[in-house]
Image: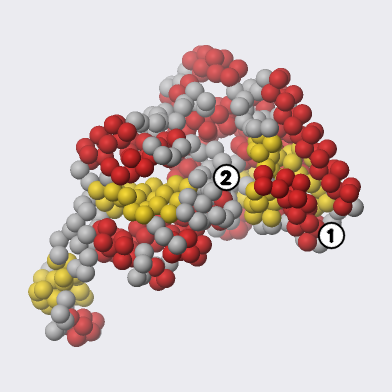
Amino acid sequence: MKNFDESIYEKVILKFLPQIVPTNLEKERAMSVFERVKSVLEKAFRDAGLEGEIRLEGSMRHDTWLRGDMDIDIFILLPLGDRSDLERVVAICQEIFKDEWRERYSEHPFGEVIFEGYRVEIVPCFKIERIEDRLSAVDRTPLHTEFLLSRLNDDLRREIRLLKAFMKGIGVYGAELRVGGFSGYLTELLVLYYDSFINVCKNAINWKPGKTVLQLINFYEYLKVPLDLFNDEPLIFVDPVDRGRNVASALTLEKLDIFRAAAKMFLKHPSENFFYPLNPPLSLSDGELLSLMKQRKTFFFALVFKGLEVAPDILWGQIYRSERAIVEAIEETGFQIIGSLPWSDEAGLVFLLFEVTHREISAVLKHKGPPVSIEAEINFLKKHLGSSKVLAGPYIGEKRWFVELEREFTDVISFMQHLLTENIDSLGLGSYFRQALKKGFTILENEEIVKYLTEKDDELRNYLSIFLVKKPSWL
């Protein structure tokens, strides 16, 4: 790319790189935690007469993790058998860790436990030699590890860490539904494909969303095949151990665009500001939040409730689906939405923030009907002539029929109360979301929202701060 200053880039990297590589002490402690958990699991499986190879997987196994990361992925590789074997492993783990165990669910149950400050994921899978033998989606993971370990070296690991830190700094790292970004595995494959972090950036700015196909193993000679197979997903990176899988399937178009834009800006002006952890979360004070909200002269309200206690991917699927349904209902009624912000502590609490241009709208709705002289005008006239809701019309203007109606709701809070009580079953909410709402909810307005933040952790404050400022800190 023109105007890329290699010397400035090298200075930035030389200063930043030592801060993202785990120390020897960190590595020793993480391995010690893994070995202790492994020992506990091995004893429990022996007592239960269960065969299983316990292995460290993920970025710690690949040695591509970042300093400060406290996640350990432990896989239990079982002989090929029945899927009930996976559930049996989960039940044993639940018995071992008791109240500390949090069950998760992807294609099948797994779980996590906090152990000496580390978030330890324990995932059962079947041990396979060929991808054709897989019985569950996670059976691929050990094959991913074998593929990577046969190709990684210290130089590539350094570049992967730079790319991960960059992605964390700009907020696009993580394939979980809540984020919709780049997975660790995808990040590793991108560096293998392009050889370096900076080459990933240089090439990413030319990716064409929905039309870019990357392959480390040349499975597809004709790119139309993967394009059709993966249905125009924003980015396609064919899994080198499974030709039928797009490693980038979780990546949203928004996060892809953020990465491409940030990469372009970084190439123009290399800076530490793009990287994690030098880029701390934005956290505005109560006074700063209130000042920004008042300056906008709009109306904020938040829907708050508890009881949505399901696995994270199910949780966020329910939240996003329900958020869209509520936004559509608000807009259809005539209120103008500026934005919305979903948040959850993933322990049952849900907070949905909405910003509308006005709390109240006019009592009159100008409703556009069909053009004059087409058959639909008869039905339009039959529906509205003599209706008690019609304030004026029907009448002709701009070559079509119009009618002016009396709105049922002119206050957005009254509308929300009605929507979430009288109309909740027909709203199109996620089923778990709807059930939790029926147990009770609270609607907060303007200053009440900021007051509520003082009772919660900093993450929600950070989310609201970013929502109001919107401009990325790297820009």
| Residue 210 visible in the current orientation | no
Name the quadrant of the C terminus: top left
Residue nearest the observer in this picture, 271 or 200: 271
Vertical placement of 283 versus 356: above or below?
A: above
In contact (CB < 8 Å): disc 1 and disc 2: no
Q: Which mark identifies residue 448?
A: none
Q: Which residue is mark 2?
A: 175
Question: Alpha-carbon neighbours of circle 2 within 10 Å: few (<14), some, or many (≥20)?
Answer: many
Residue 262 horizontal/vertical position (percent): 45, 32
Question: Alpha-carbon neighbours of circle 1 within 10 Å: few (<14), some, or many (≥20)?
Answer: few
Residue 424 horizontal/vertical position (percent): 39, 68
* The quadrant where residue 456 appears: top left
Residue 268 horizontal/vertical position (percent): 43, 24
Q: Which residue is mark 1?
A: 81
Q: Which SS class for mark 2?
A: loop
Using residue 58 as the reference point, say whether residue 446 is left or right of it. Answer: left
Q: Nearer the viewer, mark 1 or mark 2?
A: 1
Using residue 440 as the reference point, say whether residue 133 is left or right of it. Answer: right
